[in-house]
Image (cartoon, rainbow, N blue to C red):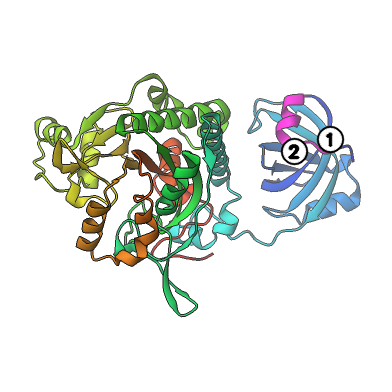
Amino acid sequence: MEKFISIKEAIKKGKGNIAIRGWVYRERKMKDKAFVVLRDSSEIIQCVVKEEHVSKKEWEALQKILIESSMEIEGDIKEDKRAPTGYEIDVKKLNVVGYSEAYPITQELNEDLLLDRRHLWLRSRKMTAIMKIRSTVFGAVHEYYRGKGFYEFQSPVIIPGGAEEGPTLFEVNYFGKKAYLTQTWQLYAEPAMFALEKIYTMAPTFRAEKSKTSRHLTEFWMQEMEVAWIGLDELMDYAEELIKHIIKRVLENNQEELKILGRDPKKLEPTLKKKFPRITYDEALKLLKEKCKMNVPWGKDLRTLEEDKLMELYDVPLFVTHYPKEIMAFYKPRDPKNPKVAVCFDLLGPEGNHEIMGGSERDTSIEELTKTLKSKGEKIEDYSYYLDTRKYGSIPHAGFGMGTERVIKWITGVDNVKDTIAFPRTMNRFTP
């Protein structure tokens, strides 16, 4: 056969003899001809096989193919408006590389069965499109930070103590000692920040949250950053720039994938064109009361319901700042102007996507950090290395964490965060 090219390259060529290879997406056999829709990682295309144009051996092999059989095909490509992607191949040669058994993925399968067969469901056009967008998002993150002079920094996955909530820690038996899977890189990033000043990571994160919502995973990829010498306003500038850069790259590179997913790209365009509003927690409560008829007691965290109502007022991500200190993580400092609140933010996504990012300035007071850790029942000795950073030339600094899967959920418009990662881990699932 000729040199193989991708289906997308074949369609771009548009005419002449070509050779492609891939898997059977659909097939329909008739008396003297067969229609085979072949797929590869780039696209799908309809192939017409006429008995008179192939050898007897090839025709007999074709009769045994089922969906997901792998094939090599050579033939003439031409434009045909009736074909699924507007082009059709008149097959001259074919080779069945691998036959498939009856494929266990059908339209009748429910979500649980599709998750049981995720290793096969990844081949679907929907999942392929999502994985391509996911790849663009990851690439855009690295591109953004490296373009801003950041260093990529990795931290341990096995740690002695937590950073968020004790009950959401995954415990690990570490040679007879109790250890945990990391909830965040932050406690190790801050020491590194004193050396490198501007750092970021993309790494798996683990939260043992007993939640079955459409936006929670027990293992997910967190994009985190830490910067020396900045405050909350500059931190939010970085956050806004990052989100805009991600959306820009997806709109540039993934229009076809958005179309496959039925996602209207126009819904993402305001994010590029508008500045993200910034309101305080107090202002959020006022908006909920006046615009949404919801009375939220001061000091209570915003739930999904309140965030949904609040975001009905916006078509771009919204910064909510200065949440009550008592409901925040230990490292978020009190605001000197109002000690009841912390110098922090959550970034809420539009279209019912809730919190996609959270960040804060970092508390530089050893006394305040120790007091808060004790109040949360933590062992101070587990954080001795972290507290040491405040003893030797402490400086103002800040950082944030972005739930990458939540951002992908918003971009793709899918209903559940489980569809934004190849093999999701939830409280009820750790296979396949």
* Few, some or many residues within 10 Å of mark 1 (<14, 14–19, 20+): many
Q: Which of marks 2 and 1 is nearer the N terminus?
A: 2
Residue 7: percent from the left, percent from the top?
A: 72, 35
Kindly give the residue lying farthest to the top in the view shown.
273
* Few, some or many residues within 10 Å of mark 2 (<14, 14–19, 20+): many
Residue 217 visible: yes
Q: Name the residue under label 1.
A: 75
Q: In which quarter of the image is residue 314?
A: top left
**Residue occupying the point 53% across, 42% down:** 130
Q: Does the magenta stretch include residue 11?
A: yes
Nearest the eye: 277 or 376: 376
Question: Is label 2 in contact with label 1 (beta carbons under 8 Å)?
Answer: yes
**Residue occupying the point 51% across, 66% down:** 431
The amino acid on which the numbered mark 2 sits, given as a three-letter code, is Cys
Residue 229: percent from the left, percent from the top?
A: 38, 34
The amino acid on which the numbered mark 1 sits, given as a three-letter code, is Gly
Query: In which quadrant of the rendered image does the N terminus lie?
Result: top right
Residue 299, which numbered label?
Answer: none
Residue 155 left/right relative to 296:
right
Nearest the eye: 3 or 151: 151
Residue 369 left/right relative to 9:
left
Mark 2–mark 1 Cα distance, whole angstroms, equals 9 Å
What is the span of residues highlighted in magenta in the rendered image? 4-14
Residue 14: percent from the left, percent from the top?
A: 76, 24
Residue 47, which numbered label?
Answer: 2
